[in-house]
Image: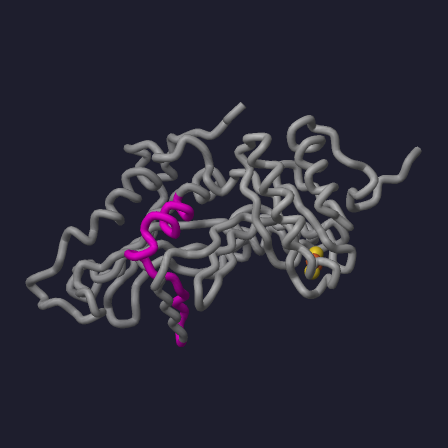
Amino acid sequence: MNSFNRQVTPLHRSTEEPLPNGGRVECEEFPVQIDVLGPLLYSLFHDHWQEVGLGHVVDGSVLELEFTQAPKIIRLYDGYLTVVTEGWHMHLCVEENQGGPDAATPEELRRKRLVSRAALYRRFNPRGQARSWGIQFWNGADERMMNVFLPNPFVGENEDLLPENKPNRAKLKLYEQLREIYVLGNELIPDETNPLKRPFISVCRSSRCNPSLNWQPIYEALQRAVAEAELEVDVIHSGCLEVCKLGPVVFYSGDKTWYTRVTPELAEEIVQEHLCEGHKIKSNLYPVVKES
Ligand code: FES
């Protein structure tokens, strides 16, 4: 059953922080459950990548990255949202990072890594005029994590500043839409389900587990079997899946299952038996299942 709730319950929590130049930052917080962060972040990187930037702003350091093409990968694995572009990638912990089958993440670290607060912000100059718009995330230790920079009406096409009296107000549309949905709860989340929770099955192609170098036939077998079974499951290949040296490794996100030493024949069996029928194939499970 899909328990996804499209209605965000507002937190009614806003703060103001003075800036050294006499200006201020106004933050309006919104909930950070995965069913809120998932659709928000997915829509930013999937639908609005041409408009937004990504980075980090702390005293003494600013990083601003922009997308020149649509991201190649937007995927949730073990609590981390990964976004991969041609030139860079980023990770943001939006759900508990539990660790691989051999190395559970300690409770305290899980809490520290996870986004604990998020806010839509506006930065005002000393004259009280809003000058930049974005989203700020904080981790469980209340440290600033990354920022998403939202379109700025004072900035033109080539990053040049527009004349003071000629801002392009249409660029505030995204900020206003996000505020209505995620801060005020006046509009519903547009998605019917959480796009980051769409199940996937992945084969490791990392050179760290040598046998995985032959991942291609397994990937193709998974693709074939999933298409034949008409399943709503993405078939992907990925970097390390945390069971190194026992490759080729396959991971199914639907119920967090790892398989090792996978052959193309076994890949097809995994789809038919496990994904379709719900029966795991014990012989290749990881951790190994001990017969009682
Ligand atoms: S490198 Fe393949 S699972 Fe780690």
Residue 148: name its quadrant: bottom left
Q: Position of residue 172 (x, y in %)?
A: 20, 51
Q: Nearer the viewer, residue 42 or 19?
A: 42
Q: Quadrant of the N terminus?
A: top right
Q: Quadrant of the C terminus?
A: top right
**Which residue lies at the image location 65% right of the left edge and 58% below the top edge?**
240
Q: Position of residue 24 (x, y in %)?
A: 27, 62
Q: Nearer the viewer, residue 273 or 89?
A: 273
Q: Nearer the viewer, residue 123 or 70?
A: 70
Reply above or below: 143 against 220: below
Left or right of residue 171: residue 246:
right
**Which residue lies at the image location 50% right of the left edge and 27% below the top edge?**
3
How did the renderer colour the structure? one colour
Residue 147 inside the magenta-drawn segment: no
Left or right of residue 156: residue 27:
right
> Which image quadrant shows ligand 1?
bottom right
| Residue stretch in magenta | 40-60
Reply above or below: 3 against 162: above
Residue placed farthest to the bottom in the image?
60
